[in-house]
């Protein structure tokens, strides 16, 4: 698990040992256009700057085969966890709206389902909340069927429980046939040379 300190200078003074989150949100990231690895690193930085949140952890990057439309580049995926300082100030709907804003900053255009994309940000979990509205479904409705979500999620939250579905680890067992490769960390690349 990577613990990145990518807080703004204003937040850097906060004593992490004394910090207690109101709840934790998990966000999946994916991209397969332009330079997806660079995009995901930049998107993680953007996520770390969302007011009222604190980046808790970020997974490794994973290369995955596309689902649905097969004739497109492989995706690069990751999952991050954000501590929500106050769920009343940053409710899930507001967090989702911020995710859409970040996608737009990276040139995301919504056309057909499973289309190639510059950046996709999915709100997977927001604490243990269960929400079903036209704008938001939590837990994310297909997260338990996707190795590209479950593998990085389990890397940063090995004991994760998905409300009404159970253990993420048990659910991952049914996705093991999906193509997914963990990419080496930049420090691993320099050691291999």
Image: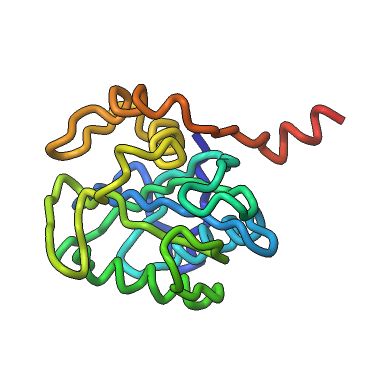
Q: Measured from the top left, where is residue 14 in percent x and y? A: 38, 56
Q: Quadrant of residue 164?
A: top left
9, above or below 147, in the image: below
Q: Measured from the top left, where is residue 153 in percent x and y? A: 39, 38
- Identify the coloring: rainbow
Residue lying at the far right of the rendered structure: 193
Q: In the visual, does 26 lie left or right of 114?
A: left
Residue 102 appears anywhere in the view: no
Report the number of discs. 0
131, above or below 88, in the image: above
Q: Residue at x 77, y 35 (%)?
A: 189
167, above or below 5, in the image: above
Residue 191 appears anywhere in the view: yes
Q: Measured from the top left, where is residue 185 in percent x and y? A: 66, 37
Between 26 and 5, the residue placed more toward the observer is 26
Q: Residue at x 13, y 65 (%)?
A: 133
Q: Quadrant of residue 91?
A: bottom left
Q: In the visual, does 131 lie left or right of 23?
A: left
Q: In the visual, does 142 lie left or right of 38?
A: left
60, above or below 50, in the image: above
Q: Residue at x 29, y 22 (%)?
A: 170
Q: Measured from the top left, where is residue 30 in percent x and y? A: 51, 54
Quadrant position of the C terminus in the picture:
top right
Q: Quadrant of residue 90?
A: bottom left
């Amino acid at each position: 698990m990577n613990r990145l300190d990518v807080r703004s200078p204003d937040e850097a003074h906060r004593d992490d040992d004394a910090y207690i989150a109101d709840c934790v949100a998990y966000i999946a990231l994916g991209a397969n256009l332009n330079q997806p690895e660079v995009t995901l690193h930049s998107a993680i930085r953007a996520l770390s700057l969302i007011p009222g949140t604190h980046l808790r952890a970020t997974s490794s990057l994973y290369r995955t085969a596309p689902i649905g439309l097969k004739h497109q580049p492989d995706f690069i995926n990751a999952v991050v966890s954000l501590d929500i300082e106050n769920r009343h100030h940053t409710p899930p709907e507001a967090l989702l709206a911020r995710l859409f804003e970040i996608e737009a900053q990276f040139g995301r255009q919504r056309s057909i389902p499973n289309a190639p994309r510059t950046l996709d940000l999915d709100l997977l979990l927001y604490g243990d909340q269960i929400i079903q509205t036209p704008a938001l479904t939590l837990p994310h409705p297909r997260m338990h069927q996707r190795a590209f979500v479950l593998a990085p999620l389990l890397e940063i939250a090995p004991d994760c429980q998905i409300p009404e579905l159970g253990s993420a680890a048990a659910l991952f067992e049914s996705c093991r046939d999906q193509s997914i490769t963990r990419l080496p960390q930049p420090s691993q690349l320099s050691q291999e040379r």
